[in-house]
Amino acid sequence: MKNKTSYSAKELEEFKKIIEKKIQLAQNDLSLLKSTYKNDGDNGTDDTSPTFKAFEEGSETMSKEANTQLAIRQEKFIRDLKSALIRIENKTYGICRVTGKLIKKERLKLVPHATLSIEAKNVQK
């Protein structure tokens, strides 16, 4: 069997479906994250001691900061997935940007936005 230099149209279509599904799930997760850190709802601590309320507000601030960081990561993940869709359209999807060889199908199914083969990724470490 000769070494392939690109994936077939059928294979690219298969990857496209995987990526579109991941984008949908990631956008749903992002919406949930955004709704939690934008939530200004009252936690019902108005009638409790000031010390408890301070702890509650501090915890809420830390939680919002963590959710904001998660949302930023999720937005980057969505951008990376959308870039992968562009590479599918350009027929360059699955080609390692360092070695120029095809990234293994198994890797792309797990990490569909990958632009590096395992070999190239290991060299980076």
Image (tube, rainbow, N blue to C red):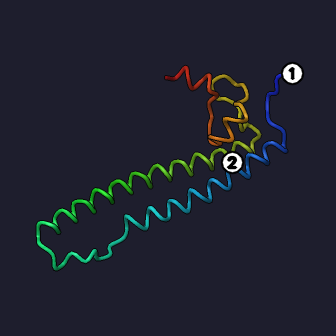
Q: CA distance from mark 2 to mark 1?
A: 26 Å
Q: Closer to the camera, 82 or 124?
A: 124
Q: Residue at x 60, y 23 (%)?
A: 120
Counting residues from the start of the chain, the first of labels 2 and 1 encountered is 1
Which numbered tag is attached to residue 18? none
Residue 3 in the image: above or below residue 14: above
Report helix, strand or loop for mark 2.
helix
User: What type is the residue that disc 1 sits on?
Assistant: Lys
Label 2 sits on residue: 85
- The residue positioned 15% from the left and 67% from the top of the image is 52
Q: Is residue 108 left or right of residue 50?
A: right
Asked which quadrant contains residue 24, the reply is bottom right
Q: In terms of depth relative to the viewer, which is nearer, 59 or 98?
A: 59
Percent across and percent down for residue 27 are: 56, 60
Q: Tell me residue 90's x, y (percent).
A: 75, 42
Which residue lies under the disc numbered 1? 2
Q: Quadrant of residue 55?
A: bottom left
Mark 2: amino acid: Leu
